Image (spheres, rainbow, N blue to C red):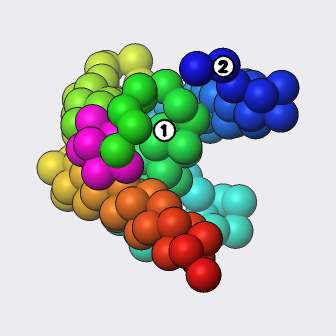
Amino acid sequence: MTLSKQSQTIQILAKSVFIAYALALSTGTHWPRLDLSKVGLSLNDKMVHFGAFTFFALLLACSGWVKEKESMKRARKCLLIACIYATVDELTQGAPIIHRQVDALDLLANMLGSLFGCVLYVVIGRLRTFRRSF
């Protein structure tokens, strides 16, 4: 099955946005002694983790990297990938040159955010299908 020119363009754009976001996320989580309060963000650290990984998982699911026709199967695979990434991301912050600490609650917030992003992906897909049925 060949994709239309428009679908191919959208898929390339979605993959590009995901790659850019993943690189920005990795840079942000590994920046030595990062202090978000210095840039005017007074959000709870765990909410930042939750939101960042919600967006990561949602972008991953929308990017087309995970090849599954059924949205629930795609969401499950994306959740697994996002949780593995979150674990590696959090553990590598413990490297001495990064001057960050590994935090189990950060990892939990990352995983819960990933779960929420995948749930959003499925819900949005179902709403779109429901809307088309009218």
Badge 1 density bin: few <14, some 14–19, many ≥20, Cα 10 Å:
many
Which quadrant of the view contains residue 87? Answer: top left
134 shown above or below 75:
below
Where disc 2 sits, the SS reads loop
Where disc 1 sits, the SS reads helix
Which quadrant of the view contains residue 118? Answer: bottom left
Tell me: 43 left or right of 120: right
Q: Amino acid at mark 1?
A: Leu
Give the camera-side residue of 29 and 66: 66
Query: From this viewpoint, is residue 13 visible?
Result: no
Q: Is residue 48 magenta?
A: no
Q: Which residue has dot 2 on it?
A: 2
Residue at 45 percent across and 58 percent down: it is: 121
Tell me: 74 left or right of 34: left
Query: From this viewpoint, is residue 10 visible?
Result: yes
Q: Which residue has dot 1 on it?
A: 60
Residue that protrudes farthest toward the bottom in the picture:
134
3 shown above or below 125:
above
Q: Is residue 74 magenta?
A: yes
Q: Main secondary structure of the magenta part?
A: helix
Q: Which residues are magenta?
A: 71-78
Residue 31 x, y percent position in the rendering = 53, 32
Residue 112 x, y percent position in the rendering = 26, 60
